[in-house]
Amino acid sequence: MSANGRHRLSRADRNEQAFQAHNQRRVAFEEAGGVWEDEPVPFACECDDPDCTRGIELTIADYERAVAPESRFVVAPGHQDPAVEEVVEEHDAYLVV
């Protein structure tokens, strides 16, 4: 892989992890507030685009299940990047990459 390709993968990984860290703080905030188990919560799309502002609604349980395996992220449909990600689950409102 070229140096440019490695740089792109590294940048994509950093962006996805930053969005995921935001969503993990959201989980803690919502749980502290007593959100209902089946209530959808707005999460940030965890795609590799640093300028993405797309929201995704899913329950905390669905979010935690989706990202439980290391290196998995939730993204809005159409926000997957086939150059650096593989879709492993498809849902109406989000994908798991």
Image: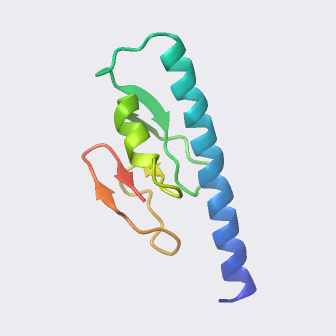
Give 65 or 18, whichever is nearer the viewer. Answer: 65
Task: Please provide percent x and percent y for residue 7.
Answer: 72, 74
Task: Please provide percent x and percent y for residue 42.
Answer: 44, 29
Side of 31 relative to 25 (left or right): left
Q: Residue at 54% across / 41% down in the picture?
A: 53
Q: Residue at 63% across / 61% down in the picture?
A: 13
Q: Residue at 69% across / 64% down in the picture?
A: 11
Query: How many numbered markers are drawn?
Result: 0
Task: Please provide percent x and percent y for residue 81.
Answer: 48, 66
Give 68 or 40, whichever is nearer the viewer. Answer: 68
**Residue occupying the far left of the picture:** 92
Task: Please provide percent x and percent y for residue 51.
Answer: 62, 48
Determine if residue 58 is in view.
Answer: no
Is 10 located above or below residue 53 in the figure? Answer: below
Side of 38 relative to 51 (left or right): left
Give 92 or 67, whichever is nearer the viewer. Answer: 67
**Residue occupying the far top of the picture:** 33
Q: Quadrant of the C terminus?
A: bottom left
In the picture, residue 87 is in which quadrant? bottom left
Determine if residue 52 is in view.
Answer: yes
